[in-house]
Image (tube, rainbow, N blue to C red):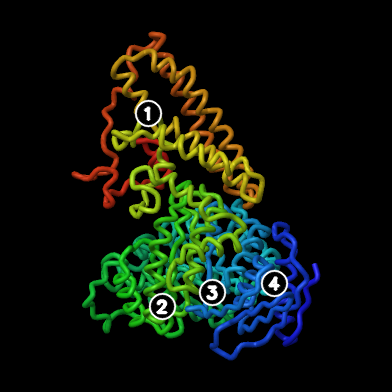
Amino acid sequence: MNISFRGNQDLIRSVEKGSRLLLSEKNLGEIPAMTFLLEESPENAVSSIEKKGDACTIRFQEPAQYFRLFNYVLHHSSEDFSLEEKPYFSRRGFMLDCSRNAVAKPGKLKSLVRRLAKMGMNQLFLYMEDTYEVPDYPYFGTYRGRYTREELRDLDKYCALFGIELIPCVQTLAHLHSFLRWHNSEALRDTGDILKVGAEEVYTFIRSLLTSLKSCFSTCSIHIGMDEAHMLGLGNYLRENGYEESSVIIRKHTDKVLELCRETGWTPMMWSDMYITANTGGGYYDVKGDTDTSDWERPPKGLGMVYWDYYNTRKDLYRHMLRVHKALSDRVVFAGGIWNWNGISPNYGKAFCCSRLALDACRQEGIQEVFATGWMDNGAETPIDAIWPGLAVFSFLCFHEDLYEEKLRTYFRDCIDAEMEDFLLLDLLDALFKGSGKNLSADNPSKYLLYQDPMLGIFDYHLKDTDTEIYYKTLADKLEVLAASPGEYQEFFRFYYCLALVLSQKAGLGVRIKNAYDARDLSTLKEICGKVIPNILRNLGDMHTSREALWFADAKPFGYELLDIRLGGIQTRLESCRRRLRSFLEGRVEKLEELEQERLPYWELGDANPQDPKAELRENLWDRIISGCDLVDTV
């Protein structure tokens, strides 16, 4: 591959190695010989590219802009063209959740880094609650697949090849239940997942966290978390100190953590919700338009306030919340969401809608730091590759005012090496009630209809007049083509094909069993025992095997055991269901009490039907889906 570089030697040194790595990707195809002239663009000017024949001139300020343009050349090398662009935001990032059981392998992260470079993004946040090594605390991240310091240092160097800042996103107050569960964490514990503010042992612990991280990252930026500490000061702290307003507690703790950050060389930011809710006493997004913030407890100067909002579908609300944040802090960062966490399947329609509105509001309010979040709620059931459409749209909007359909399709193909339309089929898995692209209420039937017990039918009340069999079989037929197509995403689409195939018979199984039992339709019950359940089990076995293959390709093994148990539980309960039905068919029991139980609404929808845009049919907690009994507290 005959590619040469000329021009500004400093610029060449900053991007050449990363360029060679992109050129070596297997799926790139044949690239003709080309000469690249690299020139520095004036400060704050647009980046530009001009290609004529085998000569290409790229003018840029930062490597992230260069790699975005360079990637465009590689995918359009047979064309002559010129273009220029300027990002709307100086810092553009993505946060990957590495704390909800799936800790992405370093190799998977490097693949993500290359794609972020192609998109022109310049930050990668690793969300790590306890999934990184802290030598003084051996139980921190034990059995969780934590990153070693060597792994983080290597990844930091790799990111630097593409001009991407690798930033630790950690927790210094709440969301630490996986660590605080251990016997030697008692002195640190306020409640089950919150640190005991004010305790000397807590600040010794936090100093160790910050010191260990500092040895791994070249950046000074750190995200110190501190969100959703709803029970702050109401556990051991309350018993030892008496009651104190949470706004006062959070201020004192923040001051101390900032002091530790300064001592260890960090420039911090934190989630803003505890400051908002502690000042208002209400919900995070419930700040009234005429609220006077002049007497609010304020964060210290220099502490970035991260306004996170993945939900709202009104631009005026985003603008209002951004103004509230600007009144509180001189550094406001916006964090949006790509909705890969809806359960087992992504919700691209919600992600696209919220990203458009939020980033438009950020442009109008002059925000310069934005990043998208890819959470892995409730056990990382969604494969990592489900992030791509949401991330592509978010990054596209960092450079464009709107989603221009043809440009977006080409952009997705150039950055992800796949077709956007193929990925968008996955939006249908949870669009059973609302329709693809319209599921703004974030229904997730592909999860609860997969896991729910067919003998209990906890969600079956809401399936009246819904033909789940035809719906999911039609989708499975579409996904089958992708599952049979060789390529990087074949196993990914095979998993979702198997899921749709399972749902085509499993989703409505409880309804069918209950109707047949009530009508004493023994022939249907026999068919369910002899044909339907065995067929579901075969497809479920294929789905389980496919998900296992995806997990071990993308993530460390720790955490898969829980997903294995969940999927294995479906099989076990289907087999048990068949035995129970046979006991009734063979006259060994007179009735099945599970099927005598009246099917009640899981959600109170009032007069709304499931198709109503305002009706929310979402349940993402596995332990609530599988039973009406209590899985967690059985003491």
Q: Marks 2/1: CA distance?
A: 49 Å
Residue type of the residue flagged with mark 1 = Gly
Closer to the camera: disc 3 or disc 2?
Answer: 2
Q: Are marks 4 and 2 in contact (CB under 8 Å)?
A: no
| Callout 2 secondary element | helix
Task: Give me the disc on residue 222.
Answer: 3
Q: Is residue 529 above or below residue 82?
A: above
Amino acid type for the residue under numbered disc 3:
Ile
In this rendering, is residue 474 above or below 21?
A: above
User: What residue did someone put label 2 on?
Assistant: 363
Query: Can residue 159 be seen from the camera position used here?
Result: no
The residue under label 4 is which amino acid type?
Lys
Q: In the structure shown, which secondary structural element does the residue marked by tag 1 occupy?
A: helix
* Residue under pointer 1: 510
Q: Residue at x 74, y 75 (%)?
A: 54
Mark 1: few/some/many CA within 10 Å (<14, 14-19, 20+) = many
Identify the mark nearer the N-term, 4 or 2: 4
In the picture, which quadrant includes the N terminus? bottom right
Instruction: Indicate which label's residue lies in the foreground, 4 or 3.
Output: 4
Contact between labelled residues 1 and 2, with CB atoms less than 8 Å apart: no
Is the residue under label 4 in contact with that under label 1 (CB below 8 Å)? no
Q: Which class describes the residues within 10 Å of circle 4: few (<14), some (14-19), or many (20+)?
A: some
The CA distance from mark 4 to mark 3 is 17 Å
> Residue at 40% of width from left, 62% of height from top?
310
What distance separates the C-alpha of mark 1 from that of mark 4? 53 Å
Q: Amino acid at mark 2?
A: Arg
Task: For marks 2 and 1, give the one nearer the viewer.
Answer: 2
Q: CA distance from mark 3 to mark 2?
A: 24 Å
Find residue 157 and name its label: 4
